[in-house]
Amino acid sequence: MNVIWWLIICLEITLNASPIINIITLACPNECICLSQTQVLCNTGGLQEIPVKHFPPTVEHLSLTKNNFPIIKSDAFGGLRALKKLTLDGNNITTIKPFAFRGLPRLKELSIQYTPLTTVAPFAFAGLQNISTIILGHNKILRVEGYAFAGTANVKMILLINNPMIKLEPFAFSSLTNVERLILPSGLRQIEPDAFNGLDIVGLLKLSFMDLDSLQPFSFRNLHNVKVLSLQESDLGIISEDAFDGLAYVESLNILNNKIDAILELNLTESHNIKALKIYGNHLLETPEPGTIILDGIETIIVQNNHFPCGCHIHTLLESPLVNTSSYDHHEFLSKNFCISPLELNGLQMSRIDLSSIGKCHEQVTRENLEASTGRNSKNI
Ligand SMILES: *[C@@H]1O[C@H](CO)[C@@H](O)[C@H](O)[C@H]1NC(C)=O
Ligand SMILES: *[C@@H]1O[C@H](CO)[C@@H](O)[C@H](O)[C@H]1NC(C)=O
Ligand SMILES: *[C@@H]1O[C@H](CO)[C@@H](O)[C@H](O)[C@H]1NC(C)=O
Ligand SMILES: *[C@@H]1O[C@H](CO)[C@@H](O)[C@H](O)[C@H]1NC(C)=O
């Protein structure tokens, strides 16, 4: 505080003394402090609208916190072509109009936090060609509508933490390319099909603390070139057929520490171009049906520290591609995974149970008999 007063006093003394710097005072709105021609603070409240025309056109850092701006209009900052960093935290922003930030070719960082904003509307951030960070944490954002970030190339980081968002809508991140980190809030309850459609070249896409009924078909359709896609610390519910359909070129698909009710299908083939699949620390409540897990063309598959049912279905599990049979006779898998059920085996390392004492399930025996008999029949023909 003292430092700021001191600066103001110094400024006023200099301002009164120098007609050149007086021009800055003219170009500084009353409610603001123009620390220099490049740095302006309007953090004390009282502004009802953004006095764009009164800022020095050279301003690079503009902080407008705790004012009363319910609506950010289109082109609200037009003309501030030198602006690099803009902070709008703590305002009562409820609406950001399309192209609100157009005409800011040098803007690198935009922060809008602690506002009552509920919706990020289509094209809200369109036209920011040079932005690297958009910070949208601690708002009341429920919806990121389709194409919200359209026309915003080269964003490195989008931070959406601490918003009460429950649903990711189709095309919400469409046309974003080259995002290094997309950090979503916890508590998501629904990922709509195509939520990530059109998102290309992503470093880290982390989805954590979700509470889903199911991972729906086509959740990741047209999501391409991802270094790490991580689904973690979530209730994933049921993994539907085609959940990962259309996802391609992923260095590492991580499924970590989730609860999974069932996997109806996990079909990851060459066309997905997934280098590594890490299934680690999950609790899977049901054994996938035979033939529903297809893992082809994945260089590294790590399945460790998971809990699986160890009833009669354990034999189905051990025949599934989740188990790397080329690594010494199931042993690796059995020693690194655990039983979730039946109750008396809960928590037990799989290698410590006597597999031969667990009978195959009735339907498996029937199926094998059927296969054997149809095999015989076809040989007879
Ligand atoms: C929000 O901004 C409007 C400006 O029109 C003002 O009237 C209203 O009192 C503000 N609300 C709060 C909670 O600051
Ligand atoms: C983007 O920012 C860099 C410096 O960070 C600058 O050299 C470049 O001219 C900017 N691009 C545009 C379109 O202004
Ligand atoms: C698995 O996916 C491939 C293409 O990605 C498809 O050709 C095949 O039919 C699918 N298999 C099943 C069982 O759905
Ligand atoms: C299966 O295990 C072998 C031997 O440990 C290993 O070389 C191979 O990479 C594993 N396969 C996959 C797909 O991880």
Image: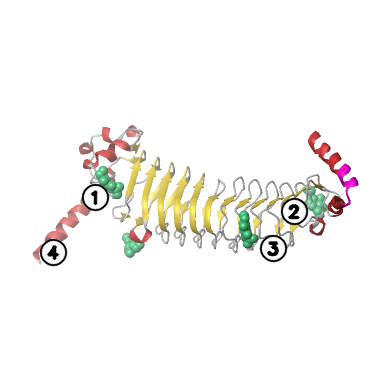
Pointer 3 with pointer 4, Cβ within 8 A: no
Is label 2's Cβ within 8 Å of ligand 2? no
Q: Amino acid at mark 3?
A: Gly
Quarter of the figure with the N terminus:
top right
Ligand 3 quadrant assignment:
bottom left
Query: Relative to the observer, which residue lies in front, 221 or 73?
Result: 73
Left or right relative to 33: residue 214: left
Tell me if mark 3 has few (under 14), some (14-19) or many (20+) residues whose alpha carbon lies within 10 angstroms of its own: many
Q: Earlier in the sequence, mark 3 or mark 1?
A: 3
Residue 45: image x %, image y %?
A: 81, 46
Q: Earlier in the sequence, mark 1 or mark 2?
A: 2
- Give the number of the mark in front: 3 or 1: 3
At 40% from the left and 40% from the top, the residue drawn is 281
Q: Which mark is residue 103?
A: 3
Residue under numbered circle 1? 364
Residue 84: image x %, image y %?
A: 68, 53
SS under mark 4? helix
Residue under numbered circle 2? 59
Give the magenta range: 12-19
Q: Earlier in the sequence, mark 3 or mark 2?
A: 2
Q: Earlier in the sequence, mark 1 or mark 4?
A: 1
At 38% from the left and 46% from the top, the residue drawn is 278
Q: Main secondary structure of the magenta part?
A: helix
Label 1 to label 2, Cα distance in Å?
72 Å
SS under mark 3? loop
Tell me if mark 4 has few (under 14), some (14-19) or many (20+) residues whose alpha carbon lies within 10 angstroms of its own: few
